[in-house]
Image: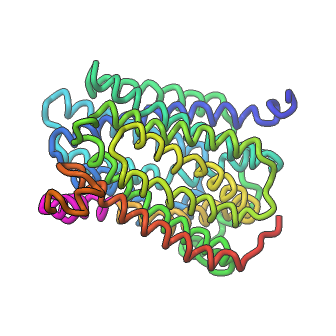
Amino acid sequence: MKDTIKELKTFLVLWSTQSLSQLGSTMTNFALTLWLYQKTGSALQTALLSICSYAPYVLLSIFAGALSDRWDKKKTMLVCDTLAACCSVAVFVLLKTECLMPVHLYLLNALNGLMNTVQQPAGDVAMTLITPKEHYQRTGGMRSLSNSLITILNPVLATAVFAFAGLEAVIYTDLLTFGVAFCTLLFWVKIPDVSQAAPEKEPFGEAVKAGLKYLNKNRLILWLILFLAGVNLVASAFDATLPAYVLPRENGGEKVLGVVTSCAGIAMLAGSLIATLLPAPKNRIRVIYITMLISLGTENFVLAFAKTPLLWCAAQIIGWLLVPVMSTNLDVILRTTIPVDMQGRVYSCRNTLQFFTIPVGFFFGGLLVDELCEPVMAAAPAGGMLRAWFGAGKGSGAAMMMFILGVLGVAICLYFRGVLRKYTLKE
């Protein structure tokens, strides 16, 4: 045990402080979602926050990967984190001067998304460089564990701080956690250089294409990425729908939304512990598509017909319990298959292909709730089947949307199951 901790010392320091900073950032994002929904009451306008964050991430990730493989990983992370913190400062200043408007949040979220586009591939490669190969599954589970804790804590803490001290206090917390992570990375973390210098000599245009060429030759990785793109489409539409599902209901509201969201984190925490302790499976590919079929095939349908917060929480737990198991197995496949000197470029191509469906899902999720599902439910007869299934009043349209997402999620999983089962993985 002592030897393991010694081998993972650098990883543990970087992982813990970066996770703390991520907690502060997600608290701000959650509080801004509450603030914007209070101002607009629109699922689509609230979803635009996430759309603006992901749009530059999707559009520019391929180029960011080529730059990430050339640039110093530590300096890249420091600069990007600093500029992202400046966005939080800008929100604070606009709020204090009573000038904050939705358009400001959209623009700042776009800039924040741009910084994350460059920072994430650098951070992913840095984690590979400081982690011994034999600990990839363990550290993958630990990263899922921290993500789960963040999902549990951020809505509860953000809601509490937002309710008692306002948005300013949430931003103070964000900046404090940033300062801890920044100083730790600057003074106490050393990230090794990538052993090969080929990316430096390779023309930039060729470096941009290299990730796409790698995926074209390695179709298993490509199909896994496309499968997760479909999963992300459903998941992001779900995220756009959930506030409109919980907030307007008589037994809903901000506190209930915080509790329901935290239940997803509790489930991911348990799933992360499972992923960390489980032995390596015989077929990681099968684990990936089966876990997603279970998740997408249960949560959305339960939420579509459930009427009480207790069942909403149960649905979140069922839906998110196996997500860390999936992500840990995917992480091991990527890290053991892709050469480390190629990972920045390939990860960035993955980011574009796997995550381009997230802004699409947020947009159509919010749009369909506002413009289709809620009007349909408002016009539905009082004694009709739709009212019996999905309820009445504002929020019933979001329940109808959950049912649509359940059907779509199952269809995506069954299609890619047929594709992925033809492949085997050699470790």
**Residue at the image position 48 percent from the left and 38 percent from the top:** 263
Is 101 placed above or below 326 here?
above
Evaluate whether residue 311 shows in this view.
yes
State the residue in front, 71 or 27: 27
Q: Is residue 72 visible?
A: no
User: Seen in the image, is 339 located left or right of residue 119?
Assistant: right
**Image position, residue 259 (x, y; %):** 40, 33
Q: Is residue 299 above or below residue 288?
A: above
Residue 341 vs residue 285, the one in the foreground: 285
The residue sitting at 44% across, 40% down in the picture is 313
Q: Quadrant of residue 356?
A: bottom left
Part of the protein shown in magenta: 362-379
Residue 94 lies, in percent from the top left, at 20, 34
Quadrant showing the N terminus: top right
- Position in image of residue 352 (x %, y %): 48, 66
233 on left or right of 13: left
Q: Nearer the viewer, residue 278 or 73?
A: 278
Residue 325 highlighted magenta (yes or no): no
- Foreground residue, 122 or 251? 251
